[in-house]
Image (spheres, rainbow, N blue to C red):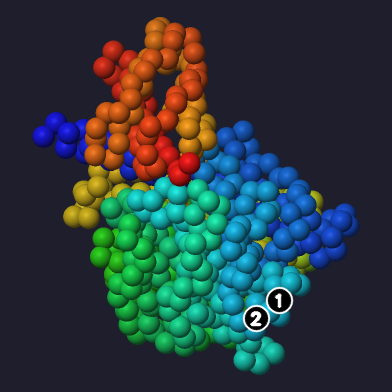
Amino acid sequence: MKIRTIAAIAISQCLCTIISAQKLADANWVGGFEEYPHVAGYANYIIRFQPSGVMVDTLDFGVKIESTVASISDSSGQLLFFSNGCVLADANGQILDNGEGINPGPMHDWVCDKTGYILQKGAMILPMPGSPNLFYLLHLGAEYIKPTVLNLGPFYYTIIDETSKSVVSKNNILLNGKLEAFSVVRHGNGRDWWILVPEWGTDKIQTFLFEAGGISAHNVQATSISMNGKRLGATTFSLDGSRYARFHADQGVFIADFDRCSGLLENFKFFPTPFPLLLGGGVAFSPNSQKIYAASQSAFYEIDLVSTLPAWDTLFYLYDNYTWGTTLHQMQYGPDSKIYLNTHSRADYLNALTFSGTGAIPSFQFKSLPLRVKNARSLPHFPNFRLFDLPNSPCDTLGINTPVSASEPIEKEPMGLTLYPNPATNQVSLAFDPSWTSSGEVQYQIFNAFGSRLRTGEVPKGADSQQVGLNGLPSGVYFFQVTQMGKTLGTATLVISQR
């Protein structure tokens, strides 16, 4: 009984460690179109969202990113992998083993060597629930039927192994047919993910569940609202996961409530556009989920969803203070709680919407984020990594508690327990808050997945790190615990890889 109790505590600590790590998963945004290699203004860039502010660095990855881009970062906010929809690369721009040939077919053969893949919001990288070293790239393929008609599909997944820095399985088809942009939101249990993929030209939305065993089809919902816009649309979830939107600039916006336990959409509403909007296509909810924003080429529109008579309302026109070349397009929340927007053409900046309060009218910041090199319509695709469990719901069964509010930006946190390298082989270094040893030594313990204590040791007073040997421990998942006088100061998960 004692072993089971310890095991339960260890597993709970493991879940909390993994979940806490995901708060920084969107800390790095990669982009940049190397149309003319080694020419000023054409290179890759990385946007780093840090507690001290937003930093932009230019890089010479040599990876062309035209529209499709996805990235994922580790628990310390360091870039792990990124993709341009054609290849998967590590933080140094090196192609992963078996990382080429993403999105196979005529479109890949046509664009990948020239520009990178061409679907905005066409890819996303997610951590696999329950497996700290596996990541899934979700990605949409595409094909041209006519010079002006672009069909989306199939919908694929590709599996990345962080330990070996390799792609272990790729281009697995989840869904065929004519599709639209997908969106992802956290399951109410705080660990798993819901994936929604609309069918183009129908009223159906396909729902998948991504859990510890992988991705499986969950249900298909008919919404009574068919959408077949001539231009690519957009979909999104509110930051708290309670609402879902599907938008076509030349048709309107479909909005529904979303049940994060069942994965079902409810209370369907459709607001047709009062007139066909030009280009655009971006859509986002306000931080409090009570308003929806939609972008056309040159104007922002808002619908107040809690009004007695919700209707389209123009927030502002760019032409009121227009700068040549500025257009409005796709939207993505940043870790700093701003909504960033790309443009239809190449530009060396991102625009942004900022909020002075959760219910306030957003202000538009032209050239909010200078990039110094060209962005070619790319904008990463992320879920809200700071949203976790749904408290007091029937599916909140894993003991995972939301560490911050759904819309809270990254804040500087006290240093906890960090293990590196991780995965490790023969030894691992512990690093932790120096205050832990200011009054005396601390103790560390290593447990296996069954709760058995395998190693113990001490870190002397005044130290903030310690090396621990791992010889004799087989490959697998282990749990570190640091205590002082019986009080737990920190926990972390360690993966020991094959020697």
Residue found 40% across the figure and 7% down from its top: 439
Q: Quickly name the residue at label 1.
A: 111
Q: In the displayed image of the protein, which residue is found farthest to the left? A: 1
- Label 2: which secondary element: helix
Callout 1: helix, strand or loop? helix
Marks 2 and 1: in contact by CB < 8 Å?
A: yes
Amino acid type indicated by mark 1: Val
Q: Where 453 sits versus 97, above or below?
A: above
Please state which amino acid type lies under the numbered disc 2.
Met
Q: Check residue 107 in the rendering and tell me which mark sits there, or answer none.
A: 2
Q: Residue at x 24, y 35 (%)?
A: 451
Give the side of residue 4 with respect to residue 437, left or right.
left
Mark 2 burial class by Cα count in 10 Å: few <14, some 14-19, many 20+: some
Rendering quarter of residue 276: bottom right
Q: Is residue 281 visible?
A: no
The foreground one among 391 and 425 is 425
Q: Name the residue nearer the viewer: 190 or 492.
A: 492
Query: Horizontally, is 93 left or right of 164 in the view?
Result: right
